[in-house]
Amino acid sequence: MNPGTRWETFAHEADVGVRGSGATLAEAFAGAATAMTAAICDPARIAPHDAVIVDCTAPDEEMLLVDWLNALVYEMATRHMLFSRFEVTIEDHHLSAIAWGEPVDVAKHQPAAEVKGASFCELAVRHAPDGQWLAQCVVDV
């Protein structure tokens, strides 16, 4: 993850909010993906051994965020993997990314929850006055 990329989770009733921020839209999306991983387990426990390519296209940035996070949920579920590193490129509402991670190891990763999907709740993608990008939504756990 780029040193300028930040991420955090936030409480939202029974679900979990995920938020990423960074100097670019791509950094904010990578941060949101890391925050989603943090809703499952500590991202630092996941070794970035295996690469998975993810491509998404959406009509706007907010839908692109939901599609991106849901594509990662799909990859985690079908490949039985967790991801800790994301290289994201966004151009004209098209996202191309590489997600690095490893197969789930319950003893090592100690997953606390399973993310079922990204929702439209508290969905926001915006360029803040301080020049940083913010990308957030709530994920169903």
Image (cartoon, rainbow, N blue to C red):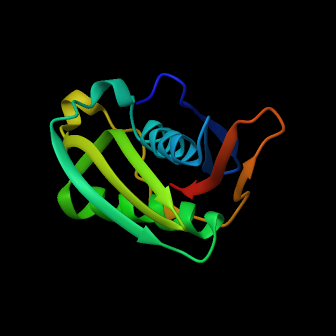
Say which quarter of the image contains residue 107: top left
Name the quadrant of the N terminus.
top left
Q: Position of residue 76 (x, y in %)?
A: 29, 56
Say which quarter of the image contains residue 45: top left
Side of 15 relative to 109 (left or right): right
For the image, the number of numbered tags is: 0
Q: Residue furthest bottom?
A: 59
Query: Is 14 rendered above or below residue 87?
Result: below
Residue drawn at (70%, 50%) of the image: 13
Residue drawn at (42%, 41%) of the image: 37
Q: Nearer the viewer, residue 2 or 36?
A: 2
Query: Is 74 rendered above or below residue 59?
Result: above
Residue drawn at (39%, 34%) of the image: 41
Q: Nearer the viewer, residue 75 or 96?
A: 96
Side of 87 relative to 20 (left or right): left
Q: Residue furthest front?
A: 91
Query: Is 84 rendered above or below residue 71?
Result: above
Q: Residue furthest right?
A: 129
Query: Is 124 rendered above or below residue 64?
Result: above
Q: Position of residue 127 (x, y in %)?
A: 74, 47
Q: Position of residue 83 (x, y in %)?
A: 31, 43
Q: Nearer the viewer, residue 70 or 117?
A: 70
Q: Position of residue 24 (x, y in %)?
A: 59, 41
